[in-house]
Image (cartoon, rainbow, N blue to C red):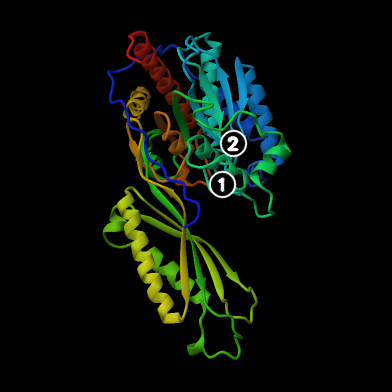
Amino acid sequence: MGSIAKTESRASTGLIPELKYDAKVRTDAQRTIETLEQACQWGNTPDGGMNRLTCNDDDRKVRDWFIEEAKKYGCQVKVDSMGNIFAIRSGQNNDLPPIGLGSHLDTQPTGGKYDGILGVISGLEVLKAVHTNNITTYAPLAVINWTNEEGARFPPAMLCSGVWGGAFTTEYAHARTDPDGITLKQALEGIGYLGEVPCSYDANPLSAHFEVHIEQGPMLDAAESPVGIVKGVQSIRWYHVDVVGREAHTGTTPMDRRSDALLGAAKMIVETNRFVTEGELAARGARATIAVVNSTPQSINTIAGKVRLGLDIRAPSDADVQKVEDLCKARFDEICKEHGLTINFDLFWVSPALQFDPTMVQCVTESAKDIGCEMELVSGAGHDSVYTSLKVPTAMIFVRCRDGVSHNPAEYSRPEDCAAGAEALLGAYMRYDNYLRSKHESGKA
């Protein structure tokens, strides 16, 4: 079945009384947008999008900028063995691990300026608000850039937060290759970001992790809500599906004597779509997509003998993902029998459905309500917070994006919505910091 990363959500401590913080401390909307624009200097494309793949030269430049920016506001910097960057500002109780505010600066090859980037910039804005107001937080604060969240150059996605969370080994992650055969370890060495700190919770712990991210879906935009409260993340599984037939001459092989792997694959694509657009699975929000099709021998007068498909199945529950998988396997087998084909499923990545820590979610909920936002969502996409939740209390804040468009140069969030996300993050962070203060000062830690 190949290498599989399995995740389970960390148990929570339960809800807490309403937490307050000094509301006189505010983020700066104009500064947030200016910082966002600075972060998009490297890797921007003529169509308004971004192409900043992990460990390319633009990634190196934005990492250098991130570190220098964080140092201006009292941070010391750690870089771990997966290139994850932790910019840490000391607190009152430095025996506690930092509260992390993290996301990613890498993008898709045809990505936008907000996916991941907004989360790191929101963390920087909270840091700036705290520092310029001369606030000493109880726990240290860490703004984090997680390496290779997108997985566009080095699959799978969320790879390096996954190493930190214990879902992957460092050796496995270092050995991932790009299409040119370059390993991630070689690429990190090449840009000077193969750090010496071991990549693990044990070696470099956090107390908690908040993440701001654009929704990448249409719900907030339809509701005209700038910010959403993320309750959890849906179940996700990725598969390689290998279909094998027989190469033959297109002009001399009768239609009824063919074992056409590409024809069989095409029927599989149609059936996959049908399973999640009809009936109860569709009503419950299941999704299945085949977006990668590689056939050989790629000769116009030779019937395709081999096809590899990339299958992505998602649903709010693990049970529904399993149902879609079962339907696909059964129907794909029937198609293979009809066309004289063989098939192999390789389940190479699993991210079970999870619920975020209720205390952390409460901090987000109260902060969002302060700016007039109450909509609750389950994330349809995976994020670095999936893997931080394996080790520490975790929660997310979504910011609306126009028409739900993402992984596209047209990806766009309004400046006022970006600012609202940073403000919600500040409130949630300060509430959780006060929660830790109350726990430790009362001797309940």
Q: What residue type is labelled 2?
A: Leu
In primary-sequence order, the first of circles 2 and 1 is: 2
Say if residue 43 shows up in the picture. Answer: no
Q: How far apart are marks 2 and 1 (CA)?
A: 12 Å
Q: Which of 416 and 397 is in front in this view?
A: 397
Q: Where is residue 415 in the image (x, y as percent from the top left)?
A: 52, 31
Q: Position of residue 204 (x, y in %)?
A: 53, 26
Q: In this view, does 348 lie to the left or right of 54?
A: left
* Residue 105: assigned label: 2
Say if residue 39 shows up in the picture. Answer: yes
Instruction: Kindly identify the residue that appears in the image at 31 percent across and 54 percent down.
Output: 320
Q: Residue beneath label 1, please?
A: 151
Disc 2 on helix, strand or loop? loop
Disc 1 on helix, strand or loop? loop
Instruction: Kindly identify the residue that appears in the image at 50 percent across and 28 percent down.
Output: 202
Q: Which of 12 and 54 is in front in this view?
A: 12
Q: Where is residue 115 in the image (x, y as percent from the top left)?
A: 53, 40
Q: Nearer the viewer, residue 193 or 66?
A: 193
Q: Is residue 108 left or right of residue 445?
A: right
Q: What residue type is labelled 1?
A: Gly
Screen quadrant of the C terminus: top left
Above or below: residue 256 compared with residue 347 = below
Instruction: Kindly identify the residue that appears in the image at 35 percent across and 69 percent down.
Output: 330
Q: Position of residue 436 (x, y in %)?
A: 39, 16
